[in-house]
Image (tube, rainbow, N blue to C red):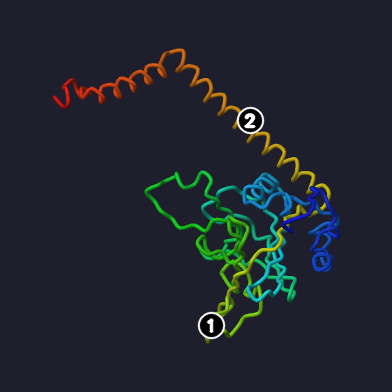
Amino acid sequence: KRSGSANNSTDAITTLLSLPIFAFTSISTTKFGEKWHRLYAGADGWTFQKLEHAIMGYDGPTLLVMKASSKQHESVTLGAYTAAKWERNKRDFFGVPDCFLFQLVPTLRVLKSLPKMGTRGGHYMYFHSNTNTHNLNPSKKVELAEGLGFGGTVRTPRLFIDCHLEECRASSNDTSFEEGHLGVTPSNDPFSSTFSPSGGSSTSSSLHIDSLEVFAVGDSETILKGFQAQSHYRDIADSTLRNARTVDKAAFLGDMRNGVIETKAFAHRGQVDGRAHGCLKDDGKANGM
């Protein structure tokens, strides 16, 4: 939920989404384990950067659960399970077939992953933000959805959470998960967010996210290894950042010692003074004379 206290470690029954999740995960305690550790909740900071920091580096199964609502105030609880770790700023899909989409409210539905057939399918997980991506190749403009998702395409994932953590989009079919409606009940109203044209086989829902949580799940050993991997990941990230700052500082001090910065500053001042007197030189020839 967007307000309230946050706790990094919690049992499933302490969450706001406890009742439907408890019934759902009781089906398989082997896969989900008896005790969960919360990686992220809205109270930790309602930004995509906070979510990214919370889940990146954790190497183990995770369960993403959200409550959302339609414009007609219909409530939906849905999410996804995946056994693969999240990867930062991917421009394509990743993950393993051990994953599924689910809906708990208003109806219970589990949509298993489909096997990859050549170039068809295999679009299990997606994570893309604008950090360090737009400058990779400025001449090549590719319209990628910014956020995280499952299934579908890089432009329109089947289950998608936008980079503002405000909107969730869910559709009824793709080539990576079983067919089935996610979101509010389809409507015959052409102005509804869940409208499907007559004879159309696909429906979609546009929902407002009310709460979002991500949990580390599995047995105790799996979760421990996942957190150890995340700790190592963060140590490397911190070390890389410190080294980058040290290199920048060393380069600056080197320029100071060599007079590069001072030379550039006086050169700029000379150009400004030259313009003021109409005698800025270019290639040895006076201008404005």
Q: Tell me the residue at 68%/60% (across/down).
A: 98
Q: Tell me the residue at 80%/62% (across/down).
A: 16
Outermost left residue: 289
The amino acid type found where label 2 is placed reads: Ser
Q: Is residue 150 visible?
A: no
Q: CA distance from mark 2 to mark 1?
A: 54 Å
Q: Tell me the residue at 75%/71% (across/down).
A: 104
Front-most of residues 15 and 288:
288
The amino acid type found where label 1 is placed reads: Pro
Where is 278 relative to 28, above or below? above
Between circles 2 and 1, the one closer to the viewer is 1
Point out residue 169 in the picture as x, y percentages from the top left corner: 59, 67
* Crowding at mark 1 (Cα within 10 Å: few <14, some 14-19, many 20+): few
Point out residue 212 in the picture as x, y percentages from the top left corner: 71, 59
Where is 75 relative to 13, above or below? below
Point out residue 20 in the picture as x, y percentages from the top left corner: 80, 68
* Crowding at mark 2 (Cα within 10 Å: few <14, some 14-19, many 20+): few
Element under label 1?
Answer: loop
Q: Which mark is residue 236?
A: none
Point out residue 83 in the picture as x, y percentages from the top left corner: 70, 55
Q: Which residue is mark 2?
A: 239
| Quarter where residue 237 is shown | top right
Question: Which quarter of the image is occupied by the C terminus?
Answer: top left
Q: Which numbered disc, 2 or 1, marks the residue that appears first in the sequence?
A: 1
Do residues under tags 2 and 1 come within 8 Å of each other at their CB atoms?
A: no
Q: Which residue is mark 1?
A: 190
Outermost front residue: 276
- On screen, residue 191 versus residue 62, left or right, reads left
Element under label 2?
Answer: helix
Q: Is residue 108 visible?
A: yes
Question: Which quarter of the image is occupied by the N terminus?
Answer: bottom right
